[in-house]
Structures are given as structure tokens and as C-alpha cells.
Image (cartoon, rainbow, N blue to C red):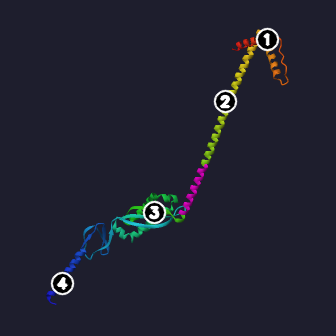
Amino acid sequence: MNQLDLSLSFFVILLLAGAYLLYQMIRIVPQGEEWVVERLGKFHIILKPGLNFLIPILDQVQVKLNTKELIQQMKAQEVITKDNAVVIISAVVFYKISEPAKAVYSIDNFELAVANMAATTLRSVIGNMELDASLSGREAIKASVSEKISDHLEQWGLSLTAVEVQDIRPSDNLQEAMEKQAAAEREKKALIMKAEGEKQAAIAKAEGLKQSMILEAEGKLEASRKEAQAKVALANGDKEAMEAITSQIKNGDAPSYLLAQRYLDSVHALANSANSKVVFIPSDLKHSLEGVAGNLSTLFSTLK
């Protein structure tokens, strides 16, 4: 190998070394990422998105972190409530890396830590709630879990965005028992409604009977009142007749009238008798009838 070949080889080596050093010195960080750089094994700097320069060999990119919002899916798990009921719940935690250095150096695996912290906190919150409250209290569960884990996430250089409860439902056995209880409650309400209807019908029937009896009593009372009025009117008529007769007695005409009346009554009774065959006609019949007619005329004039 001649001198020219050696020089050319050395130049190529230098060129490759320069290209490598230039590659090691220049770093372009994409948007949505931040890189953790160590110098001689110690944390040195965080590279932001864009063009950055490092000292080759001395500076090393240790971790590339995603600064976008991260999603931690929690698998469905069985949790026992305060009243010893088993519910199945699943949730999602949304968070971001706010301090990359803490996220790398304060905890070994922040993603696993977030998942475990959210799961244990969720079990603790549900364990302090009754079954009905847990099934209907999604907002209360989210607020309580967020409050409890946000401080821990800050210590790890993370910021909590939101906690969402995906699903919360009773276990299969509990759900079957609840369905039976609901069916029993519906049957109970139906029986109560039926009994209430029968009660109202009985009340309405009794009220109708009561009204009927009242109307009947009022009708009888009205009939009795009219009958009494009729008797009073008849008594008043008899009273006026007696007063008229008394007036005639005072005038001296009543004896002839009464005698004639008794005579006619006797003849009438004799005529109606089944054994009567002979009718006696007195010799002074004409004179007696004239007296009776006159007395009756006088009496009727007085009554008018």
C-alpha cells in the first residue's frame, strides 16, 4: 500500500468519525416528545421538541418520553361494597407527564404505578359505599378517586387529567337476586293497588247505599209531612163544620136537623139490611123532608 492509499484511507476514517460525531451532537426532538439526557451517568437536561445540540460521548439520551395525554385502562374487577355486595367495575385514567425527570427517576415504572394506584383507590372508595350509592354514584366515585390519586401522581411528575368510570354493575348472582327482589316489589305494589281499589269500591258502594237510605228517609218524611198536613186540613174542616153546627144549635134550627139526620140514617140502615122487606113511610114525611132541606140549605150557606 503506497502513501496515497494510506492518506485516502485516513481521510475516509476522519470523514466517518466526523459524521458520527456530528450525528451524536445534533438531536431533533419531534413534537409531543421530551428526551431525558444524562452526562456521564447523571441527569443533565431535558431536550424539548426541535433542534438540540449535545456533546458527543459525554451526553447520552437516556429516555424518550411521550408528553401527550396518556390513557391507563383499568380492567374490570370485583369489589365488595360496605354492605357486603359484590359489584364489577372498570375505569379509565387520563394523565400527562408534567415533569419528565421525576417520571424517570422518582419511580421505576410510572405506567404500572398509575394502574395499581387507581385500582387500589377505586376498591377503597367502593368499599366505603353502600350498593345503591355505588351503582348510582358515578360522579361521586370519580371525584373521590381523583382526589386521592392526584397527590401521588404529582410526586411522580405526572398530572391527572380525568378519571372516568366505564362500567359498574352488580355481579351475576347479585343481579339475579335483585331481579327477584324487584319482581317481588312489583307484585307487592300490584296487590296493594288491588286492595286499594277494592277498598275504594267498597267505600263508594257504602256511600251510595247511605245516600239511597237518606233519600228514602227524606221521601218517607215528606210523605208523612203531607199526610199530616192532610189530617190537619181534615181536622180543620171538621172543626169548621162543628162550629157551624154549634152556631145552628144556638139559632134553634139544629134539633130538627139532627132529628132528620138520625131518621135518614135509620132508614138507610134498614134498607141495606138483608132481611128487610118492608119500608115504612111516615105520614109526615113531606113535612120532615122540607125541614131537612131547609136546614141543610141554611147550613151550607153558613159553611160558605
Q: Nearer the viewer, residue 170 or 46?
A: 170
Task: Mark 4 or mark 2: name the one nearer the start of the chain.
Answer: 4
- The CA span between labels 4 and 2 is 143 Å
Residue 26 belongs to the span the image colors magenta: no
Q: Amino acid at mark 1?
A: Lys
Query: How far apart, in angstroms, are the residues tagged by discs 4 and 1?
Result: 192 Å
Judge depth for marks 4 and 1 and give the one in front: 1
CA separation in Å, label 4 and label 3 = 68 Å
x, y (%) of residue 40? Answer: 30, 75
128 horizontally vs 6: left or right: right
Q: For the residue marked with disc 4, what is the amino acid? A: Phe
Looking at the rendered structure, which numbered label has been put on residue 10?
4
Quarter residue 279 falls in = top right
Q: Are marks 4 and 1 in contact (CB under 8 Å)?
A: no
Q: Disc 4 vs disc 2: which is toward the camera?
A: 2
Q: Is residue 210 above or below residue 115?
A: above
Magenta highlight range:
175-195
Label 2 vs label 1, nearer the camera? 1
- Image quadrant assignment for residue 281: top right
Amino acid at circle 3: Asp
Marker disc for residue 167: 3
Q: Name the side, left or right, on which 57 lies relative to 152.
A: left
- Residue at the far bottom: name it: 1
Pick whichever, 113 or 39, lies toward us: 113
Marking on residue 286: 1
Q: Residues within 10 Å of mark 4 (few under 14, many from 20)?
A: few
Q: Tell me residue 160's x, y (percent).
A: 38, 62
> Who comes first in sequence, dot 4 or dot 1?
4
Between the residue at mark 2 and the residue at mark 1, the CA separation in whole angstroms equals 51 Å
